[in-house]
Amino acid sequence: MRILVVEDDPVQVAILLHAFDKPGYAVLHERDGKRADHLLSTHEFDVVILDMGLPGMDGAEILRRLRHRKNNVPVLILTARDEVEDRVRGLDMGADDYLTKPFDIQELEARVRSLIRRGHAGSGAELQVGALKLDTVGRLASLNGEALDLSSRELNVLELLMLSAGRVVSKERLSDQISGLGDLVSDNAVEVYMSRLRKHLKPGSINIKTLRGLGYMLEKQ
Ligand code: CA
């Protein structure tokens, strides 16, 4: 799950990054409003945690622009207890949920999980291609009814391939997914992940096809 945290208060940032420092989450942090707006227009996330008061561009404007681009990524806004107007404005601009600071970290995690579930509701929390199933909320993949032992990054890559089953996924998108946007990954790393996944998927007659110069495609044999 790819989470973007947009927050300029270093203490809040530390709390948020710590909360999602666990398998299954890839968190990217941005403190500047304009740069966050740019990231949101160039990358895909599963959920956005957005502070309202930011340098560069405020949270409400980021949201307005995001929804104007018809981007429906779930957004949770963070506001101080006395910033009622900010909260109302954020919800008016299309936020899905809000929390007031200081918030309880377990409540935040629960709200984020719920938003991710809702965000995936359209495509179904469970993806299936032939004998291959992936529970995108519980982060479990199975083949012929047997659980697959996959790392968090392998699961991220598999999810992307399954969402686009029968269609080509570019190497760049896959490399983004592997790095969790943290750092650049070589083309070679993408190939290594593909070869590992192929081994896992072979018993179920699921193939990952290489299309030279284009990318990869998941398909039933
Ligand atoms: Ca702030």
Image: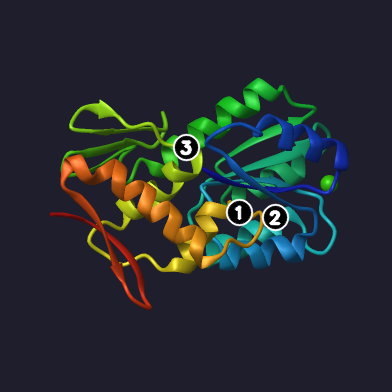
Splitting the image into 4 quarters, where does residue 104 fall? top right
The amino acid marked with disc number 3 is Ser
Rendered image: mark on residue 151 = 3
- The residue that mark 1 highlights is 93
Report how far apart the C-alphas of labels 1 and 3 lie in the structure. Answer: 37 Å
Q: Is residue 92 left or right of residue 217?
A: right
Q: Residues within 10 Å of mark 3 (few under 14, many from 20)?
A: few
At label 2, which amino acid type do we have? Ala
Element on which disc 3 rests? loop
- Select label 3 or label 2 by which is in front: 3
- Measured as percent of width and height from the top left, residue 14 is found at 80, 36
* Label drawn at residue 60: 2
Q: Can residue 139 be spotted in the picture?
A: yes
- Cβ–Cβ below 8 Å for labels 1 and 3? no
Q: Answer with left or right where residue 201 lies relative to residue 5.
A: left
Dot 1: few (<14), some (14–19), or many (≥20) neighbours within 10 Å?
some
Which of 35 and 53 lies nearest the eye of the viewer?
35
Q: Residue at x 56, y 64 (%)?
A: 186
